[in-house]
Image (spheres, grey):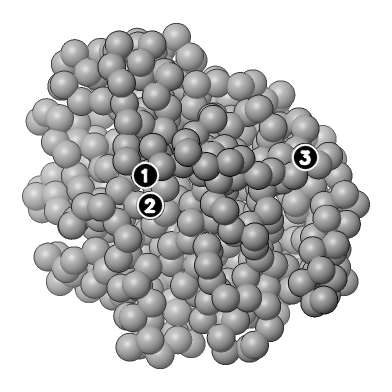
Amino acid sequence: MKFVSTRGQTEPHSFTEAVKVGLAPDGGLFVPESLPDLSEELPSWKGKSYPELCHAFLRHFATDIDRDELKALIDDAYSHFDHKDHAPLVKLDEKISVLELFHGPTLAFKDFALQLLGKLYERQVAATGESINVLGATSGDTGAAAISGLLGKEGVDIFILYPDGRVSPLQERQMTCTEDPHVYPLSVTGSFDDAQAALKEVFGDKQFSGEVNLSAVNSINLARILAQCVYYLYAWLQLPDDAREKTTFVVPTGNFGNILSGWMASRMGMKVAGFRVATNRNDILDRFFSSGNYSVGDVAASLAPSMDIQVASNFERFLYYTFGQNSEKTRSVMAQLKDQNAFQADDRSVIRSMSSSRMDDAEIRETIKSVYQKYNYIVDPHTACGFKDLDALEHCLILSTAHPAKFPDVIEETLGLESTHPTLETLKTRAIVKHPLSPDVDSIKEFIASKQSSDQQ
Ligand SMILES: *Cc1c(COP(=O)(O)O)cnc(C)c1O
């Protein structure tokens, strides 16, 4: 299997190469050359453990990694989860189930992809003998999950940009209290979108990124999207046969990486009723899926900070597929977006390919309360966004993207309960180490470069 760019101006890459570079050299995102049709094979995967299922699925893509080696990588990557099912499905009532994706080391769904990515990077450093510098931007959880996945991996330095003051205190501690000299949390002024834009520019400087062997951990990385397909399949396989096609996956969404994975799985044969994009007050995607209008507004801070995003980078992959894998059209729409910060889709079938909802902070608080009262179940502020407008859905599976203990203040204020988790408690005893920076290309490049020379001394 080879991987091509959404913008069509990059040579096909192997899995390992595409994972290594992250962003395609033409500025696009890597996608599989063609999506396999798994509809025949899928039912036979029922009953597999999470790592087994992951192996069965990834074998279709990571064709340049030896089968047994891939198995070992996956087993290792998923050995640090605190639930035997990895992604347990909790039934709240006949209509609503929750897929808990917060049993990894940093208590958010991003662990599923980043624990694996860490293993892939480690393999690469061992194979080439070249160290790599990983650069990412985070609205909170990616940074923590990336750091956890890459921590202590020989030959890997980690640089994570995050908007100063806009991630939760615990998220910040997860990034800054590692006590690891190869981890550089960079707190930047501005919003996540500013950080992400600067990051894209750093990657765009091919000379620089080549010189320092730069790699991306953001959800632009192909390995993350593919790794995330697995928990959709895992949940889907657990549903009774007759419930599968009636089920809508409801996904709290920011950068559009999580839901895109599910949607891609459906294009490979996982038949479902549909997908629901659940946004917070940063509702660009809700506006798109209700009117076709994609126009970038200002980012507003909300109770669900990991979704405080306006420019959803994975949207490009979605456009590419809905345009019938037309890279020329993708390129022109992306250019228009860059110029005008907006575009209008005219094709109703594109606009209707997912449903959407939006929740403001007051509704998030009310929802945390009502879900607790009704089901005696605590949801975090991101997951809460999934509980909006469920009337129209026959059966739904809400993805729970974070453990409530990551947002103890909101839980305490709304429910009067203390929400804690042992892994978070240990962090509170450690010192915070971070590097303030302005989110411009030059400062970031300078910072990364300065760490290279000191490494070599
Ligand atoms: C990252 C994150 C999201 C948003 O996921 P995307 O893939 O960016 O859409 C939602 N909830 C939590 C808790 C997250 O960490």
Residue type indicated by callout 3: Pro
Q: Earlier in the sequence, mark 3 or mark 2?
A: 2
Q: Residue at x 69, y 43 (%)?
A: 434
Is disc 2 placed on a helix, strand or loop? loop
For the residues carrying marks 1 and 2, which lies nearer the camera in this image? 1
Q: Is residue 363 above or below residue 221?
A: above
Is disc 3 placed on a helix, strand or loop? strand
- Quarter of the figure with residue 147: bottom right
Task: Indicate yes or no: mark 1 CB to ligand 1 under 8 Å.
Answer: no
Q: Is residue 388 left or right of residue 137?
A: left
Residue type indicated by callout 2: Pro
Split into 4 quadrants, where in the image is the C terminus?
Answer: bottom right
The span from disc 1 to disc 2 (Cα, nearest Å) is: 8 Å
Residue contact between numbered discs 1 and 2, judged by CB atoms under 8 Å: yes
Residue contact between numbered discs 1 and 3, judged by CB atoms under 8 Å: no
Task: Indicate yes or no: mark 3 CB to ligand 1 under 8 Å.
Answer: no
Note whether residue 427 is visible. yes
Q: Residue at x 32, y 41 (%)?
A: 422
The span from disc 3 to disc 2 (Cα, nearest Å) is: 26 Å
Q: Position of residue 131 (x, y in %)?
A: 68, 78
- Quarter of the figure with residue 387: top left
Q: Position of residue 133 (x, y in %)?
A: 69, 67
Residue marked by disc 3? 436
Task: Find residue 105 and name its label.
Answer: 2
Q: Is residue 90 above or below residue 234?
A: above
Q: Residue at x 52, y 48 (%)?
A: 144
Residue marked by disc 1? 423
Q: Earlier in the sequence, mark 1 or mark 3?
A: 1
Q: Residue at x 32, y 64 (%)?
A: 78
Residue type indicated by callout 1: Thr
Is disc 1 placed on a helix, strand or loop? helix
